[in-house]
Image (cartoon, rainbow, N blue to C red):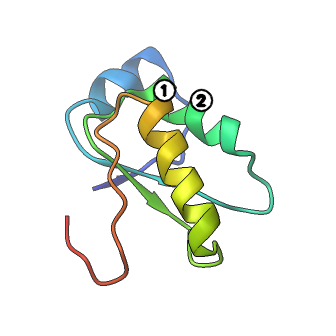
Amino acid sequence: MTVCTTPATPSTSRRSRSRPSLFPAQASWLRTDEAIDFVRAIKPQRTFPIHDAQINERALASLNSWFLQETDSGYRYLAPGERA
């Protein structure tokens, strides 16, 4: 898997489409719309959230719904211990 840490560009978008990407679902410095924009920009084939340990169940359900609705990236939430 690829951890997306570089700004999205046309060349990184083409590379990201062929492999799964990890992105931060929650952080003190991150807004949800920015995370959605990032996933849209890199256009990965599969996307998995990371940095979600401090999110309660209600917020996690909302985030999962938003990411599914707002991105076309094969989004999938993995519960702790679950494999892709």
Which amino acid lies under the numbered mark 1 shown in the image of this protein? Arg
The N terminus, quarter of image: bottom left
Quadrant of the image for the C terminus? bottom left
Residue at 27% in and 42% down: 46
Q: Nearer the viewer, residue 20 or 7?
A: 20
Q: Amino acid at mark 2?
A: Asp
**Extreme residue toward the right, this view:** 29
Residue 37 disc label: 2
Against 6, residue 52 (above or below) is below
Q: Which residue is drawn at the image coordinates 53% and 48% (left, top)?
A: 5
Coordinates of residue 49 in the picture (x, y in percent): 45, 57
How many numbered discs, if any? 2
> What is the residue that sits farthest to the bottom in this orientation?
81
Query: Residue 51: where, in percent of width, then height?
Result: 56, 68
- Answer above or below: position of 59 versus 4: below
Residue farthest top in this picture: 10
Q: From the viewer's perspective, tell me whether residue 54 is left or right of residue 77.
A: right
> Badge 1 is on which residue?
40
Between 34 and 11, the one nearer to me in the picture: 34
Q: Are marks 2 and 1 in contact (CB under 8 Å)?
A: yes
At x 48% / y 52%, what residue is drawn?
64
Q: Which residue sits at x=54%, y=41%? A: 66
